[in-house]
Image: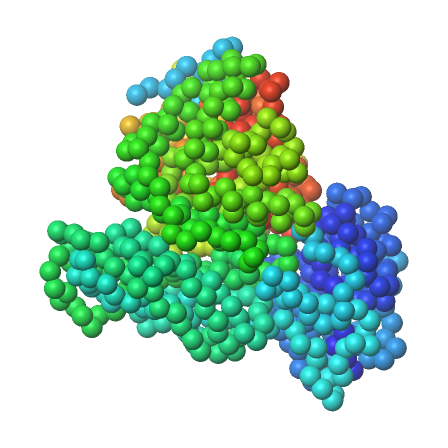
Amino acid sequence: MRCAPVIVLRASSTVRQAIRQLENAQEHVDAVLVREHGGDVLYYVFSAGSLRARLARGQPDADVATALRLGEYQPTVAVQLSPATPVGSVALEGRHVVGVIVDDGADRGVRGGGGRRVDIGGTTAEPSAAPAQSYEQPSPPPPHRGGVTTRGPAFAPDVSEEPAGPVTRGGITMLGRGPMEASADISTAAPPTPPGLFRAYPDVRAPGQVSAGDAFTLSVGFSKEPPPAMLIKGDRIEVPAEPRAEFVIQVAGFGFTFPNGIQKTLIVDRDDPESDRVDFTVKADTSEIAAPRFVEVSYEYAGIVVGRAWARVQVVPGAPTEMAKPALVGGSGLVGSLAPGEGPHLTVDIVSQDGDPKLHWRFHCRYPDVERPGEVTTNLQDHSAQSFAVQLMRKIPNVPPGPLLTATMKGIGERVADALPAEFWPIFEQTWKRAHADGAEPRLQITTTEPWIPWELAWISKDRLYHPDDLLPDPKGRVLGQLWQVGRWTPPARHLATGDVPATPPVSQVDAAEMAVIFGNYAGERGIAQLPNAVQEGQEIAMAYGALPLGISDTDVVALLECTLQRDGQPFRPTVIHFAGHGQTDVDNPEFTGLVLAHGIRLDPYALQGFDLVEQQRPFVFLNACEAGVAGESLNQLGGLAGAFLIEGARGFVAPLWEIDDVQAREVALEFYRRTLGEGQTVGEAMCEMRRQYGANSTSATALAYVFYGNPDLRLQRTAA
């Protein structure tokens, strides 16, 4: 028997994407469809030729699972690769598909458990022979402005023919394609070298206390088990890697300088992650009072940030009193498959500190030959960022449509672009060109503790780029969020014994099978404008996606957040929450910030953090309410509704930064779910397409109002029936 190399496809991808991935595959090569269902992962084996022919009869935008009616087929047994792995099984190493076990002359088609064949043309299948592999995986403003009702209170990888066995691109190993004859015989030799898994915890070591003005050593590496000093334990880093795994390590931290640089390369044995470490020289700034400071560390693999860690160092003005005590550390990594083409092309870390106008910048690029800058520091004028954000909230909804609105949005974008450092533009342009050459939509992850500046609105014009003609679709320029798929995230704001919150890096998938939609029917509410389109929005979402509709009474909302809701007699705890109604943000009076419920009650950030749902379910949240996306600062943490949801554990968050038009807000929401839940687009793709709807003839800037916190590659995955 042999382990035949395969093509691995997601059953959640669209027919169009799958056909593209298969177009150059040989007829007899096996393809494995991976389908997540009810907490399990199911595997279905087709020949590439048969699968391609079947998909050609499906709707291009349908997901593969639906087009093939995979629920009618028996999954193939999936077991860990060993000499005893039975013929017909999908062979796994950890969670990764290595290949399919076949013998000479084995036929193709769809294989059921134990190698039993189900014909591709059939419509029924036998029950599963074995369980599938488990996958761990002040008062309100007026409701009308200008006569418009508003909602304020109111990759596919390269598919050219490849040799059998693994192929490495940019440090990421993917399964090769080719004739089965290239496979090894398990009975006499090892199988083709699979993309081995690197598994380890971030390990950062530093003294727990240092004197102000003194230098110390920060040691960075990996540990097979959570390090003894890691009292805050997150997930380990788990990525496919070559025998020698190469990571780029970068450091940053307020109150520290790094005399020998902020970046080093760490190369370790894949199977012995503790084989080497890198050391950084860190110098504490002078200080007259004792204070804890944090050194932040990022782990980058193949240009993707796959882990983050921190060390808390007490800086004291005199001699340290706890020389032997190590720093308290925490960290978390990316667990799961890092498939070719996934992950942001560029990640930018923006580190700030409350009350300090200084910003520290770090850059992570997928392409190793693109030169990245070292330590970059910029300064904002004190309080200018907050006042700028407040001006946006108040000004944009009152600008009349036409040339004045167009000029205003361009002017705002220019101001935001001016706040980007000069070092940003070369790496931004080079990364864009490389993604463009690969036929990919560029993706940007912004990890920031700076809550005010809407970086997504930065105006990208010819004046900013060296060679813009082959990149800019509009010679006059566009905002960043129309040109790139952009996601924000924030470093951990709470360090808990069970892990940092929010967890970093952000996840790439949320199970969207259970959804709740709260919509504001304010009929009869004195002083609160009705929102007929919000009501229609909620009803349409509930009908289209089976969401549980809820009213805006505090009884319904509290039941949801307390995890006491039931549906059909069973506990109901959704992982997607949509709110369509009134919202308000007042950065000077936090008591007036929140979602407006019945009788004028507000669900504010403080109350939200006292409930259980977000912490337990870690949902994706879409607040389609005015100004709900404004973050702000609260006790040195990310504030506002955005901060409250993220700090409690939300895995994605979408909301507008300013007052939005009721009609257009409904259109935005329906378009968003059509793209993500209906067509399988990532949230980053959907957000970019939504922003592109804004143009010179737009009647409002609603399409540009929305901010997204999350991974640009985030998918809302609905379990196929």
**Residue 562 percent coordinates (x, y):** 41, 45
Residue 615 in sight from this viewpoint: no
Q: Which is more toward the observer, 554 or 441?
A: 441
Q: Which is more toward the observer, 254 or 103?
A: 254
Residue at 77%, 47% in the rendered image: 16
In the rendered structure, the answer to whether residue 566 lies left or right of residue 51 reads left
In the rendered structure, the answer to whether residue 77 lies left or right of residue 396 reads right
In the rendered structure, the answer to whether residue 224 lies left or right of residue 302 reads left
**Residue 711 percent coordinates (x, y):** 52, 48
Looking at the image, which residue sits at the far front? 466
Looking at the image, which residue sits at the far left? 318
In the rendered structure, the answer to whether residue 632 lies left or right of residue 454 reads left
Residue at 56%, 57% in the rendered image: 369
Residue 195 in sight from this viewpoint: yes
Q: Which is more toward the observer, 336 or 662?
A: 336
Residue at 69%, 52% in the rendered image: 156
Residue at 70%, 77% in the rendered image: 192
**Residue 361 percent coordinates (x, y):** 40, 47
**Residue 649 percent coordinates (x, y):** 43, 49
Snapshot quadrant of residue 450: top left
